[in-house]
Each structure stands twice: as C-alpha cells, then as structure tokens.
Image (tube, rainbow, N blue to C red):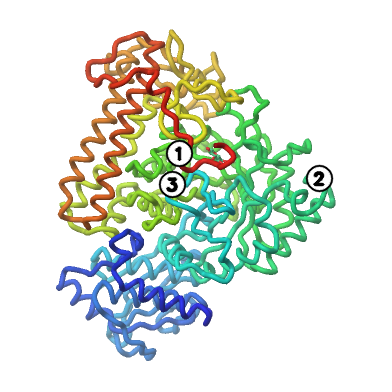
C-alpha cells in the first residue's frame, strides 16, 4: 500500500472496530463477529501466536490488515511478528518460491494453478505451523481469506490440508453504472464511483469493495455501463480510472472499461467508426496505448454492439467478428482482452428474438482472435426468472464463451424481493448441453473443460447489484447473491445449498436454529418467484421500460419484441410461444437430444412448457388439471410461499440484529403485496382469453383488470433516464 493511503488505512481500522458496519450490513460477510465459544477461542489462540508474511508486494499490507482486523474482532488477539521460524504455532504466508526451502520442499504443490492456494499444517522443529502459499500475491490473499473464513465458521484448524484452484480465469463484475452516477437496473442507490471527486478523493467504499470482492475471488471489474459513454475514454476520466485501478491492484482486481463502438467519431473527431478503416484502427491503437501507459495491467474492453440501438460494426456493413477482432488486435500487444456481448437482436430481423444471437455468432465459431471471449447471457431472451440455458453454450466448441449472469434483480423483484439467485445460477450451470455427449454441462463449457486447446481463456461475469445504500445491495439478502456469484465464479460446480450455508454463517450466526429455516426459505425462494411471476415457461410479461410489476397486456411499443404480447401470444385457443417446427423452430438450436425433448409437448419439462409451446387452455398437465387451472395454482402457490417465508422470518427474530430483522420484515411485506398483484393482474388478463373460472385454489383478485392496467410508475427505479 502506498504511503498516501496510510490515512485511509487508519480510517479503515477505526471504522472496522466501531461495530457500526456490523449492524447496518455494511461489513457484508466480513463482519468477523466475536467467536462466542471459549474452547474454540482457546484452541485458536494456542495455534496462532505468530505471523510471518514473506514478500507479497503491495498485497502484504492488505493481508496484514485483514488478519489484524479479523483476529482482533473475532478473539481479541494480535499476533506477534517473529521471523525466526522457531516459535511454532506461526501462520506463515508466502509465495511458493519465496518460502524457505525447508518448508516448500515438503508441500508438494504440483496441482496448484496460478491464483490457487494451499493451506497446510507443517511441522518445523517439531512444532506445528500453518502455511498459506500460492504462486501469486492474489493467491496468497485468497488463501488468507479462506483461512479467516474457516475461523469465522469455527472449523478445526489443527491439521489443515486445503488446496483450492479457481476453475475460471476471468471472474468479473459488470457495473451498469453511468457517469452521472445513475445505475441502469440498479436498485441499491447510486453508483459507488464518485467520478466527480476522483482521482484525488479515494472513498472508503472503494477499498471495502475491493476487500469484499477479493474475499470471494473476484478478480476484475468493468466500471461502466455497457450502454456506454465514450467520455470514459477521454484523459479527464482515464485519470480517474487509473486511481481506481491503483486502489484495486493490491487486491488482485483488474479494471476493465466498456468501449463505445462509435468513440472514434464522438471523441476522436473521425467521420467513421468502421472497424476495417485504417484511421479507425489507428485511433483504437493509440487510445489503447494511452490507457496502458496509465494502467499497465488494464484488463481490456467489454463491448455491447448493435444491440438495442447501440452502435456497432453492422452500421458499416461489417460483422461482429470484424469488430471484435479489430479491438482484440489492438489489445493483444498489451495482453488485454475483449469481452464481446452476444446480447443482440435487431429491430429489422423478424425472426424469433430467442434465435437471433445464435444465428449471428455460431457461424463464426473458431474465427475469433485468441483474446476474444463472447459474453453470453444465461438464457436467450433476458435474465428472466426462468429460461432454458442459452443454446449458444452448446454450439461454439472453438470459441471461449463467457457466462453473463445478472446479480441485480431487474426481473426478479428489484431489491425488495428475497430471492436467492445462486439457485438460478446453479440450474443454468448444471444444465446439460450435450455438446460432447451426455454430461457436457454449461459449467464445463465455461470452465474450459470442453475446449480442445487447454490455453483458451475462460470467464464469467455478473451484472452487479451494488450501490451506495448503507448495506451495498438494498436488500440484505442481495448480499448473498453477490457472495454466491463470486463463489460460483471460483467454482461453477459448487452447490447453491453450500453457498447459502456459508453466507448465513459468515453474515449472521452459526446457530442451527437460525440457519436451518432461513436456508430453507432461501433455497425455495427462486421457485417461489417463478410461481408468482412467470410460471410454466411464461416470460417477459413485465411492464415496459422499468420492468416493475406485471404488464402482459402491453402491446403498443414500437418494436414488436419489446411488447409482452409478443412473448405469451395468448389468444382464445391458448397461451405460449410456439418454438417448435410449426412455430419459430428455436428448439433446433439445441442438441438433438434436447431438441427432441423440448419439441414434444408430452416430454417438454412443464417448467418450460409455454416457452416452447402454444398450449390450449384446457390441455391437461401431469396432475390431470387443465393448463388454466395450473396457472392459477402456480400463481397462488407463489403467494402462499411468500406468506410462509414471512412466518419463518418472524420466528428467527431472537437470532438477528433488530434493525436487520425489521428491514427484511418490511421488504417481505412488499414482496407479499407484489406477489398478490402479479397473480391478480396476470390471471385477470389471461382470463379475458381463456374465459374460464379461476381454479378453486386461487384467491380471487381484489380489483378488475382495468385497475391493474391503470397502474403507472413513471419513476420506478433503475431505468435509463432517456427511457422515462
Ligand atoms: O435487459 C436489458 C435491460 C437493459 C440492458 C440490456 C443489456 C444495459 O433492460 O437495461 O442494458 O438488457 O443487457 O444490454
């Protein structure tokens, strides 16, 4: 850490010990609560007397701070710093090749990858010591956090033998943050990047943001919105970006920017942004060199091109391949990468929106330069409560595909609904693409196990849910989604249940009376939101623009695929989007094994029924009831599940801080109200087509359809100012 940051360190220390952050949620999963079990504290104290940190560059101070803070808070201990290796009960932290020989020779670390770490109990002079090692500084930091995590969870540390490697190389957050500090689809306040006071004022949040991310293995951040503003690439802003990069570097976090494709025109004074134009290429080359002169480890660019009106190579008759490769070629000499988004659909392409990205990208498989990753959303439409996995994941064996998840809940209840997203992420990651036969899960596509060439890059991105709210994410449980994303980015095969368990222990208490019921509601919450918003494969029936609440009736927007009626296609016969041969045939983009299953209404999983089929209202589902009845049953079930969640929450009151209890309790009330609203609005609307009575299980709507249609929310949060 640079000397000028010493003052900040002091502020950080004072803040960390004030207990303030713990109560309002600011400390996230790093609150390092006092360990209430004296036997364990005594054990830890006897096993942890001394600490030695071998040179970890700028990261040394970070590791030192974290250990100091954590051990003091958890058990009131400060470790001594004796470098002699003779004391025993030392915590020894050092890179593989900076550890003394007598330690490293016994460690057998052949399986350790560059950011991986090992934590081992080793004997020196007949005394036990704990060694944390890695080939890199970041790995040492990850190992330290892991070790502290074990203490927080009160694990036995007497005989440690841990080796953990990240399974994905690039683990980034995408901030959809604008330069005016609004956050597109952000529900937790304003952007944490205060561009006005940067580069001189380093907000404490930047440091705590870096700590939190490093603690879960996130190693990159894209600071700006994919709907980008070219100004970020001007010297005035680059200086500010550099300041952030300097803060994040010791935490192993690289900075990336979104690159507006038309920047050569907007800030470069050129007449074109044609990717094959020599002057344009030269402009990007010079701009890139300028960025690297300020930020030598700059990560690269994330690009949204020719999507929702953003400029791109197609404006010049070129392809995504031309655009991506041009940018990649200017970044390659600096070891930078391009993350080129596949979220494209065109206002002039009349084919099913769900098919368009596949059609644009798959034919060019294998032709992208080595430093290009194609960033694909988890599903083919848009972060819906449930979508089948994006068919591109099984169809581009020769191109690194990056996963893009949305951590912010644009379509899952903003920051007011409790919905544990790792359950959704897990479902997608464990879906079988059949790319190379059975077992070719999406996780294997993105972690590179299916690549022929071992050197191919791997990556995963999460659209951040972070803002200036005291607790960062608005909903306290939104922290679990950030945490869970990081954990899955490190290891996409982790189970959502384990993640929920870890997060609850780290954030609240390890008391099973609390953990058990709350874990249960978290794990159920994803299916619950599907039930009360988009059951049985319904999708994109949100009110327009802000996507707050139901709007299945919306049909007046300029582009057909912006209207919910495009997606549900309700008529007097039935409801749902026919994506079989008789319809758009999007099923054909999946491997034959899956296409076969989805195509046949009898074998199509019910959760995807209306995604792939237009189904008659009186069609009988597996439970013998009609589709119509089942819709009502699902909507009601979702509502009932929210009520159950509220009952559970009331019971755990004694185990949690009062403020946090009340905050969540109030949000749950909003969730209940909105779940009922979804049920009533959607069922009233669909009834105008089905003309059938509501099933007996369903509570009748309190209002008529006209009422639900009349609701209007011009200032619902998260929307682009220009879309109001
Ligand atoms: O779902 C849509 C969102 C837009 C977003 C776009 C995208 C950043 O409604 O707000 O723009 O996806 O992912 O590019």
Q: Name the residue under label 2.
A: 272
Q: Horizontal placement of 679 versus 198: left or right?
A: left
Q: Name the residue under label 1.
A: 716
| First of labels 3, 1 by sequence position | 3
* Residue 630 percent location from the top left of the image: 31, 19
Neighbor class of circle 2 (other Cα within 10 Å; few <14, some 14-19, many 20+) is some
Neighbor class of circle 3 (other Cα within 10 Å; few <14, some 14-19, many 20+) is many
* Residue 634 percent location from the top left of the image: 30, 25
Mark in the foreground, 3 or 1 = 1
| First of labels 1, 2 by sequence position | 2
Alpha-carbon span between mark 1 and mark 2: 37 Å
* Residue 667 percent location from the top left of the image: 30, 43
Figure quadrant of residue 413 = top left
Q: Are marks 3 and 1 in contact (CB under 8 Å)?
A: no
Query: What is the secondary structure assignment of the residue under circle 3?
Result: loop
Neighbor class of circle 1 (other Cα within 10 Å; few <14, some 14-19, many 20+) is few
Query: What is the secondary structure assignment of the residue under circle 2?
Result: loop
| Residue found 51% across the figure and 61% down from its top | 219
């Amino acid at each position: 850490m640079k000397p000028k940051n010493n003052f900040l360190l002091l502020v950080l220390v004072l803040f960390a010990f004030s207990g303030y952050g713990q109560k309002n949620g600011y400390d996230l999963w790093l609150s390092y609560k006092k360990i209430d079990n004296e036997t364990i504290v005594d054990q830890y104290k006897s096993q942890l007397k001394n600490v030695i940190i071998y040179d970890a560059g700028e990261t040394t101070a970070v590791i030192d701070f974290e250990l100091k803070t954590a051990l003091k808070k958890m058990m009131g201990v400060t470790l001594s710093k004796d470098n002699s290796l003779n004391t025993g009960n030392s915590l020894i932290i050092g890179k593989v090749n900076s550890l003394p020989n007598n330690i490293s020779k016994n460690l057998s670390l052949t399986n350790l990858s560059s950011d991986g770490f090992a934590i081992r109990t080793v004997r020196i002079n007949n005394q036990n010591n704990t060694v944390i090692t890695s080939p890199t500084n970041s790995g040492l930091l990850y190992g330290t956090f892991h070790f502290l995590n074990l203490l927080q969870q009160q694990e036995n540390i007497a005989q440690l033998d841990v080796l953990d490697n990240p399974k994905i190389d690039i683990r980034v957050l995408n901030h959809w943050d604008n330069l005016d500090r609004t956050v597109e689809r952000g529900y937790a306040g304003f952007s944490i990047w205060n561009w006005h006071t940067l580069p001189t004022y380093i907000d404490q949040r930047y440091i705590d943001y870096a700590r939190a991310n490093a603690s879960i293995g996130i190693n990159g951040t894209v600071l700006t919105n994919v709907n980008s503003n070219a100004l970020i690439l001007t010297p005035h802003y680059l200086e500010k970006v550099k300041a952030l990069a300097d803060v994040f570097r010791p935490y192993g976090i690289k900075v990336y920017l979104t690159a507006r494709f038309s920047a050569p025109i907007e800030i470069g004074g050129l007449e074109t942004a044609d990717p094959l134009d020599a002057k344009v290429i030269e402009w990007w080359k010079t701009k890139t060199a300028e960025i690297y002169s300020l930020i030598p480890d700059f990560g690269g660019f994330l690009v949204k091109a020719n999507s929702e009106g953003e400029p791109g190579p197609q404006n010049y008759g070129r392809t995504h391949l031309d655009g991506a490769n041009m940018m990649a070629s200017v970044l390659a000499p600096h070891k930078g990468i391009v993350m080129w988004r596949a979220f494209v659909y065109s206002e002039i392409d009349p084919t099913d929106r769900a098919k368009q990205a596949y059609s644009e990208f798959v034919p060019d498989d294998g032709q992208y330069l080595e430093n290009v990753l194609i960033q694909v959303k988890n599903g083919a439409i848009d972060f819906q409560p449930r979508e089948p996995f994006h068919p591109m994941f099984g169809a581009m064996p020769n191109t690194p595909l990056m996963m893009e998840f949305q951590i912010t809940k644009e379509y899952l209840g903003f920051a007011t609904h409790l919905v544990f997203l790792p359950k959704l992420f897990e479902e997608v990651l464990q879906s079988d693409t059949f790319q190379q036969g059975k077992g070719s899960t999406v996780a294997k596509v993105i972690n590179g196990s299916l690549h022929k060439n071992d050197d191919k890059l791997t990556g995963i991105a999460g659209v951040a849910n972070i803002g200036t709210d005291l607790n960062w994410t608005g909903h306290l449980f939104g922290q679990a989604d950030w945490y869970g994303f990081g954990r899955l980015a490190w290891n996409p095969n982790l189970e959502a249940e384990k993640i929920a368990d870890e997060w609850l222990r780290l954030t609240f208490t390890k008391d099973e009376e609390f953990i058990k019921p709350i874990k249960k509601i978290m794990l159920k919450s994803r299916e619950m939101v599907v039930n009360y918003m988009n059951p049985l494969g319904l999708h994109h029936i949100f009110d327009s623009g802000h996507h707050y609440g139901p709007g299945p009736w919306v049909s007046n927007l300029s582009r057909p695929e912006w209207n919910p009626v495009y997606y549900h296609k309700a008529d007097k016969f039935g409801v749902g989007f026919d994506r079989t041969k008789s319809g758009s045939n999007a099923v054909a983009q999946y491997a034959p094994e899956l296409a076969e299953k989805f195509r046949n209404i009898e074998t199509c999983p019910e959760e995807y029924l209306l995604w792939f089929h237009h189904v008659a209202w009186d069609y009988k589902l597996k439970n013998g009831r009609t589709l119509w009845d089942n819709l009502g049953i699902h909507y009601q079930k979702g509502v009932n599940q929210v009520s159950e969640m509220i009952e559970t929450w009331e019971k755990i009151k004694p185990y949690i801080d009062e403020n946090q209890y009340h905050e969540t309790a109030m949000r749950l009330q909003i969730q209940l109200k909105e779940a009922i609203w979804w049920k009533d609005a959607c069922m009233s609307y669909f009834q105008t087509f089905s003309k059938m009575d509501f099933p007996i299980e369903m509570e009748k709507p309190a209002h008529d359809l006209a009422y639900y249609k009349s609701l209007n929310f011009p200032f619902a949060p998260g929307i682009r100012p220009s879309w109001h």
